[in-house]
Amino acid sequence: MLMSFVLSGIVNDDVYTVYQGVKFFFIAVAFFCIYINARDLVAGDVYKISLISIMVGLLLFLMSKYSMRELYVELGDGRQGSQFAYPGVLWKTPVFFIGFVIAGTVFSTGNKFLSLLALIGGMFLLKSDSSRTGFLILAMVALLFVVLCAYLKPQTALVCSLVLGLGGLGLLILYSCGFVFLSNATEPLVLNRLAAGDPTRTQMLTDGVMHAQQCFPLGCGFGTATSLVGRENMVVHNAYLSSLGDLGVLGFIGMVVLMFSPIIIFIGKFIVFRSLSIKSSENLAYSVAAFGGVIGYAFLMMLHPFSTELSEWGIWILMVSMLATFSRQMVASENEVQVEA
């Protein structure tokens, strides 16, 4: 990936692309530091981090909406956010961390009351943002935990499914009634936005493919994959196409390897885990929560532009680091138990 920035910058005589490569280098350094230090984390630490992250995000949003109105942001279509987290960003904290709260509640000794508050607060933030991407990722994480329940606790799988189903039905009813809880009845619904489709993104995909063909094989420089939206050029909202058009084949390969190698490695470790007779539900549950975050980010990159901002890559760094930590602990703890037996 780093080489693709350099080559594309040299070929296109574009200092800006090289500069973005330097930024990406420091993101790689941050990844290395966090990845190494994440090995010291245990399940209880991540559970507390997730609770704090969601509650701080909720507190800042409520403070902006109801107290410090100059920090409140509402778009023309009704999506809400703040100067701390704009619409389109607000949903990321609850969606990517809520899996760890579920893992701590169901498979560990997490505080049930605080977990419930975090779940309600997280859903409120997602509803306020009305992100279709966030809604889909959250649904995928919920499905992963239903499958995990079926694998670890078959007797509770039906209960998990019923709880999630009733929760989803309740949310639909609240949406249809305007979600009066701390919300605005005129705000557009996530499901309405999903049903409406997205012709703008469809046009972006078409323009992104044409741009990639024109700039093959070394790309045309960072930020050149754009599409005309209204009267302004907007970067293509697909990081894979953007990396191919901006940075060439090397950039695309680097992007695919970064996004999907953690998924493949975890599946390999899970196969090893399944071959052992003893089941350590806690580490596996936290691994699944991080796995959902990694898959969610890979999916997010299909719908969002390629970025060299640490605020964007930081989510992926945390999810991959925690996936590596808990999958390693998952297999190690099983091996230790088997040896002792």
Image (cartoon, helix red, strand yellow):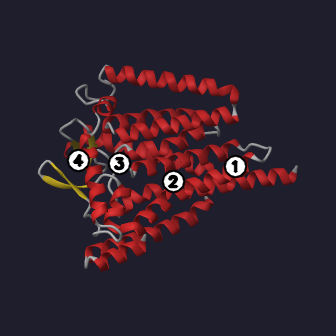
Disc with the residue nearer the chain's start (4 vs 1): 4
Q: Residue at x 56, y 22 (%)?
A: 162
Q: Which mark is residue 165?
A: none
State the residue position of label 4: 71
Q: Amino acid at mark 2?
A: Met
State the residue position of label 3: 303
Mark 4 vs mark 1, CA separation in Å: 48 Å
| Callout 3 touching callout 2 (CB < 8 Å) | no
Q: Amino acid at mark 1?
A: Ile
| Callout 4 touching callout 2 (CB < 8 Å) | no
Seen from the viewer's position, the closer of residues 268 and 170 is: 268
Mark 4 vs mark 2, CA separation in Å: 29 Å
Q: Is residue 74 left or right of residue 123?
A: left
Q: Residue at x 56, y 57 (%)?
A: 262
SS at circle 3 = loop
- The mark lying in front, picked from 4 and 2, is 2
Mark 3 residue crowding within 10 angstroms, few (<14) / some (14–19) / many (20+)? some
Mark 1 vs mark 2, CA separation in Å: 20 Å
Mark 4 vs mark 3, CA separation in Å: 27 Å
Disc with the residue nearer the chain's start (1 vs 2): 1
Q: Is residue 233 left or right of residue 102?
A: left
Seen from the viewer's position, the closer of residues 95 and 70 is: 95
Q: Which mark is residue 271?
A: 1
Q: Residue at x 43, y 21 (%)?
A: 170
Q: Which mark is residue 319?
A: 2
- The mark lying in front, picked from 4 and 3, is 3
Disc with the residue nearer the chain's start (3 vs 2): 3
Q: Residue at x 55, y 45 (%)?
A: 289
- The mark lying in front, picked from 4 and 1, is 1
SS at circle 4 = helix
- The mark lying in front, picked from 1 and 2, is 1
SS at circle 2 = helix
